[in-house]
Structures are given as structure tokens and as C-alpha cells.
Image (tube, rainbow, N blue to C red):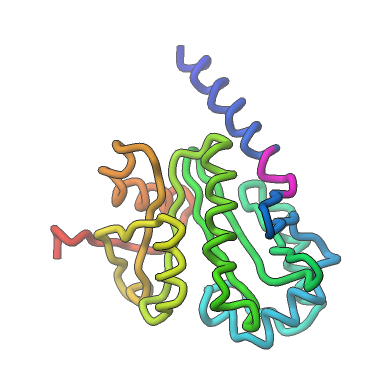
């Protein structure tokens, strides 16, 4: 019985993997799997907009650094990276979705000149719908407490704030959940903690009831 359950889980993860490695086409935005050809545009947007400080993504000081990082990411089995592509203007930003069992963790950034146009919410809805329809049960994300624009964008996508906080040095952000499963939503704090533990992240949490 256990082997059968493991087989079904493996089949589902393989289906999700296949789905997330293909382009995602929206009405206006296209999400293309990130490749080396996106590196120069990625660097230009990333470096000029101070994105690294707002996202906790790696420090990338040159196009060569971006090439190397894209190569490393391609070898990470559960990390899915996309270039946000717009008609005419092309590269506008980046999406990352990390998958752990039935859960995902989302990161989005847009270049400075593409911010404040509603593109973040469009992108978030597009990738979240694609992932949840493909078999994921829940998607988490986080935003720095001072990044009010990102927080508003996440709420427009449908994310809800979790009643959980992290101990220092990760106490400068708030955490969000998106799911249609009422049981997972009810146990959102535990689901988030389990996600971080499976991914071996150093974050430690406390909930509002334990403050």
C-alpha cells in the first residue's frame, strides 16, 4: 500500500515537473523558462533596480555572474525559473517557484520601469493558477515588511497573510499563503514550517498564539 502511494506521488511530481518546465502563456504576459539568452537583460534590470536587496536573491555583479547562476539553477531539480516577457519590450522581470512535495514558494520581481503597472499581479495570478492547476496544493511567499508595493500585489493575487513570524535575522518579513484546500489553509503555519524544514532553511518561527 505504501509503495503504491509513493508511486502515485512520484507520478504526480513528474507531471508537475513537466508542466513547470514549459512556457506559460497569458493574455498579455508570457513566462519563458529562464535561459542564458536572458542573462544580459536580467542583469540590466536586476542591477539597476536594486532588486537583490528586496528579494534576498544572490548578489550578481556582472552578466558572467548571471550566466553562472543560471547554470547552477538549471541543476537544481526543484527550482523553476522564468523570464517575464512582454510584447515589444521583451524581458520585464523574473519568477522563481521552488517545489517541495505538494507545496511551492514563489518569488517575483519586475524591473523598475515595469513596476506599478499591475504586471506583478498579472504574473502572480498566471504562475499560481498554472501551478495549482498542475497539482500543487499550496503556494507560499514572503515580502519584506517595508515593501508595501509587493504586499499589495500579493494580496491582489489572492495571497493571505499567515499569523506567523520568524525570529531574527528573518524577522523583517511577512509570510503569505495561497490555497483552495481548507485543511491546508487551517494548518498554514505548520505547512510553512514543514516546507522550510524540508528545504533545510535556517528560519525559525513563532506563531501569534505563542508570542
Q: Residue at x 66, y 44 (%)?
A: 20
Residue 201: x, y in percent?
Answer: 45, 59
Residue drawn at (57%, 20%) of the image:
7
User: Which secondary structure type mostly characterizes the magenta part of the structure?
Assistant: loop
Counting from the top left corner in percent of width and height, residue 203 is at 38, 63
From what the image shows, is residue 200 above or below residue 133? Answer: below
Front position in the image: 36 or 120: 120
Task: Using residue 99 as the reference point, say whether residue 23 is left or right of it.
Answer: right
Which residue is at a point 40% across and 44% down the rendered structure image?
Answer: 179
Q: Does residue 161 appear anywhere in the picture?
A: yes
- The residue drawn where x is 80% and y is 78% is 63
Q: Is residue 67 visible?
A: no
Q: Position of residue 123 (x, y in %)?
A: 59, 60
Q: Is residue 184 above or below residue 210?
A: above
Which portion, as a residue range, is magenta?
19-23
User: Nearest the camera: 206 or 177?
Assistant: 177
Point out residue 22 in the picture as x, y percentages from the top left corner: 74, 45
Q: Foreground residue, 92 or 101?
A: 92
Residue 112 vs residue 21, the one in the foreground: 112
Q: How many marks?
A: 0
Q: Is residue 68 left or right of residue 1?
A: right
| Residue 79 falls within the magenta-colored stretch | no
- Residue 114: name its quadrant: bottom right
* 47 sits left or right of 142 in the view: right
Amino acid at each position: 500500500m505504501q509503495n503504491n502511494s509513493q508511486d502515485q506521488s512520484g507520478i504526480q511530481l513528474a507531471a508537475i515537473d513537466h508542466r513547470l518546465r514549459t512556457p506559460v502563456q497569458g493574455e498579455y504576459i508570457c513566462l519563458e523558462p529562464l535561459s542564458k539568452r536572458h542573462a544580459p537583460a536580467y542583469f540590466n534590470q536586476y542591477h539597476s533596480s536594486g532588486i537583490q536587496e528586496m528579494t534576498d536573491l544572490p548578489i550578481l555583479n556582472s552578466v558572467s555572474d548571471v550566466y553562472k547562476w543560471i547554470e547552477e539553477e538549471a541543476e537544481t531539480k526543484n527550482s523553476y525559473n522564468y523570464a517575464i516577457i512582454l510584447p515589444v519590450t521583451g524581458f520585464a522581470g523574473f519568477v522563481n517557484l521552488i517545489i517541495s512535495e505538494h507545496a511551492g514558494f514563489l518569488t517575483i520581481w519586475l524591473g523598475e520601469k515595469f513596476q506599478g503597472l499591475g504586471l506583478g499581479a498579472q504574473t502572480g495570478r498566471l504562475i499560481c493558477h498554472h501551478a495549482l492547476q498542475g497539482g500543487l496544493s499550496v503556494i507560499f511567499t514572503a515580502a519584506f515588511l517595508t515593501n508595501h508595493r509587493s504586499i499589495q500585489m500579493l494580496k491582489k493575487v489572492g495571497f493571505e497573510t499567515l499569523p506567523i513570524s520568524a525570529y531574527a535575522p528573518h524577522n523583517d518579513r511577512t509570510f503569505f499563503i495561497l490555497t483552495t484546500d481548507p485543511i491546508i489553509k487551517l494548518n498554514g503555519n505548520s505547512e510553512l514550517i514543514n516546507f522550510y524544514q524540508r528545504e533545510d532553511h535556517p528560519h525559525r518561527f513563532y506563531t501569534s498564539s505563542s508570542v
